[in-house]
Image (cartoon, grey):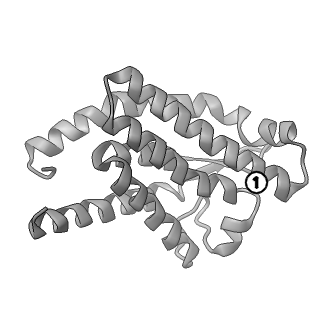
Amino acid sequence: MSSANKTKSMVITALMAAVICVLGPLSLTIPISPVPISLVNLAIYFSCYILGMKLGTVSVILYLLIGFAGMPVFAGFTAGAGKLLGPTGGYLVGYVFIALICGFAFEHSKGRATELLGMLLGTCACYLFGTAWLAYQAGLGFSAALAAGVIPFIPGDLVKIVIALVAAPMLVRRLHAAEVLG
């Protein structure tokens, strides 16, 4: 890879991390759950669709590091190690699994079904990791944590997946046409 292409990849990766940072704080907390509704997973789907598994995952890790360092990029404009180690920290770390699984599926896509499956599996991996951590942190049984941290979010997450399935390919085509992507 030429140095110009490496630079372009770094810039686009940083830009996608910035998009996640902008969408991350925009959240809504529902009264039945300590887990906020956010647009981070939608931003991750786009990031991985544009960048693939490796760089998409790097963009998510950058987002987590920025929040860990104290920039208020997590839901509700929060930040810090306490957020990552608190009850919802498992979902934050679970975003890495979304990126890995979705990025892999997008890179090896045989069509929309593969992309859909990748987003569903990635989201389920995030749910699993986040629910286990929520149960541990909040002293809940797994089913109670699942009821508080996953069940209310499934409809919204399915909508985000549909948006990504429709909009991400169009966005990538436009980025290629503008010669932003190689």
Tell whether 86 sits left or right of 178.
right
Identified at 8% across, 49% down, the residue is: 179
Q: Position of residue 56 (x, y in %)?
A: 37, 53
- The residue positioned 37% from the left and 29% from the top of the image is 165
- Please give left or right for residue 166 compared with residue 28 in the image: left
Question: Is residue 163 visible to the viewer in this orientation of the structure?
Answer: yes
The outermost residue toward the bottom is 69
Q: Is residue 39 visible?
A: no
**Residue drawn at (24%, 65%) of the image:** 11
Asked if 153 appears above or below 130 in the picture, the reply is above
Q: Which residue is mark 1?
A: 133
Residue 83, given in percent of the width and then of the height, sits at 68, 67
Which of 23/88 is in front? 88
Residue closest to the eye, 123 or 73 = 123
**Quadrant in which the N terminus appears:** bottom left
Q: Amino acid at mark 1?
A: Trp
Left or right: where 22 falls relative to 180: right
Quadrant of residue 156 in the image? top right
Q: Residues within 10 Å of mark 1 (few under 14, many from 20)?
A: many
Residue at 78% in and 38% down = 146
Residue 139: percent from the left, percent from the top? 91, 54
Under circle 1, the secondary element is helix
**Residue 53, above or below 111:** below
